[in-house]
Image: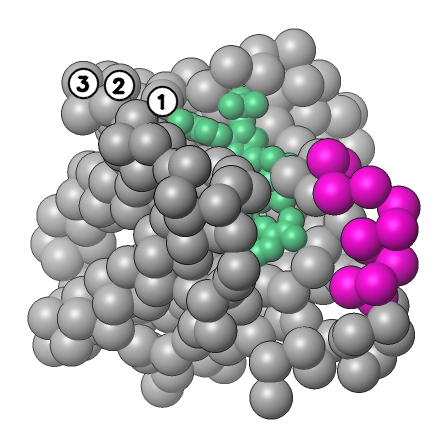
Amino acid sequence: MKQTVLITGASRGIGRAIAECFAQNGFRVGINYCASRQEALYLKKDLCDKFGTGIAEVFQADVSKEEDVKRMGEEVGASLGEVDVLINNAGVAQQKLFTQTTGEDWDFLFGVNVKGTFLCTRAFLPQMIRRQKGKIINISSMWGITGGSCEVAYSASKAAVIGLTKALAKEVGPSHINVNCIAPGVIQTQMNASLGEETLNALREETPLETLGTGMDVAHLALFLASEQADFITGQVISVDGGMVI
Ligand code: NAP
């Protein structure tokens, strides 16, 4: 029987690549989006055309909102059944001087990046505990490890995701649930589009492997962490960053 994965923020970028990679590898895929309905529906159609009707379904929810996540949990249950793998990927970033960061900026970043991870995990964890199996993969960032200048709020939110991962891994280990974290480096997605060619070239030069990453680079690690080959790995933060953080 096919396993089921739910990926938050899968309408584009890294989440979309993860959805494609998991569908290619025999998973049924739940595609969460917040605003990008057309992109999510297009991805569903693409995956169903390639891998069979019913292989993918879309679920709208703003992961920072408790009532949205509760509704999504019910819709996923009714449509795909129980979730074997949850990938908390939905995220927002912002470049600003610390002194210009407002309380609203802070709440927005922590709302999506941290509370979203908390709410989605809380929605799907009980069924994993009941079944005594499951994999949770949280997408943090290299800035959550090292801290990024002009990205203090983002870095702090991604460090919180690392803390959540480690603590939860200890708490649910006895239920045979693995909780791990991926820390991507610079990945070519819309999130980085505003940085401009010059900055992206500088970041490429700073990267030991002298290239920027792709969504598929992240997806391949997520697929491994979701597999039984990774059954003895939990509470870890694994970088996919071309050697940027060593
Ligand atoms: P992206 O291209 O901007 O895509 C972000 C995704 O998150 C979109 O699908 C978006 O969907 C969704 N999203 C945003 N707010 C949401 C909300 N409130 N509820 C549900 N979905 C929401 O970004 P990306 O580069 O693929 O980033 C994916 C993850 O990787 C993020 O957690 C990011 O922090 C992390 N990351 C990225 C990089 C990088 O270099 N790109 C590096 C390190 C870590 P809608 O359009 O429908 O809102």
Q: Measuring from the top left, give residue 102's x and y in whole percent.
A: 33, 32
| 151 relative to 110 in the view: left or right | right
Q: Are marks 3 and 2 in contact (CB under 8 Å)?
A: yes
Residue 98, visible in the rendered structure: yes
Location of mark 2 (residue): 68
The disc at residue 67 is 3
- Residue type indicated by callout 2: Asp
Sequence order check, earlier mark of 3 and 1:
1
Residue 156 got which mark? none
| Alpha carbon distance from label 3 to label 2 | 4 Å
> Helix or strand or loop: what does disc 1 sit on?
loop
| Dominant secondary structure (helix, strand or loop) of the stretch shown in magenta | helix
> Magenta stretch?
193-204
Q: Quadrant of ligand 1?
A: top right
Dots 1 and 2: beta carbons under 8 Å?
yes
Q: Is residue 110 part of the magenta span, yes or no?
A: no
Kindly identify the residue that appears in the image at 18 percent across and 18 percent down: 67
Ligand 1 is within 8 Å of the C-beta of the residue at disc 1: yes
175 or 188, which lies in front? 188
At 88% across and 51% down in the image, what residue appears?
198
Residue, disc 1: 62
Asked if residue 136 lies left or right of residue 36, the reply is left
**Residue 199 magenta-drawn?**
yes
**Residue 206 at x, y percent in the picture:** 78, 74
Mark closer to the chain start, 1 or 2: 1
Q: Is residue 226 above or below residue 83?
A: below
**Residue 25 appears at what percent x and percent y?**
66, 55
Q: Is residue 7 above or below residue 86?
A: above
Q: CA distance from mark 1 to mark 2?
A: 6 Å
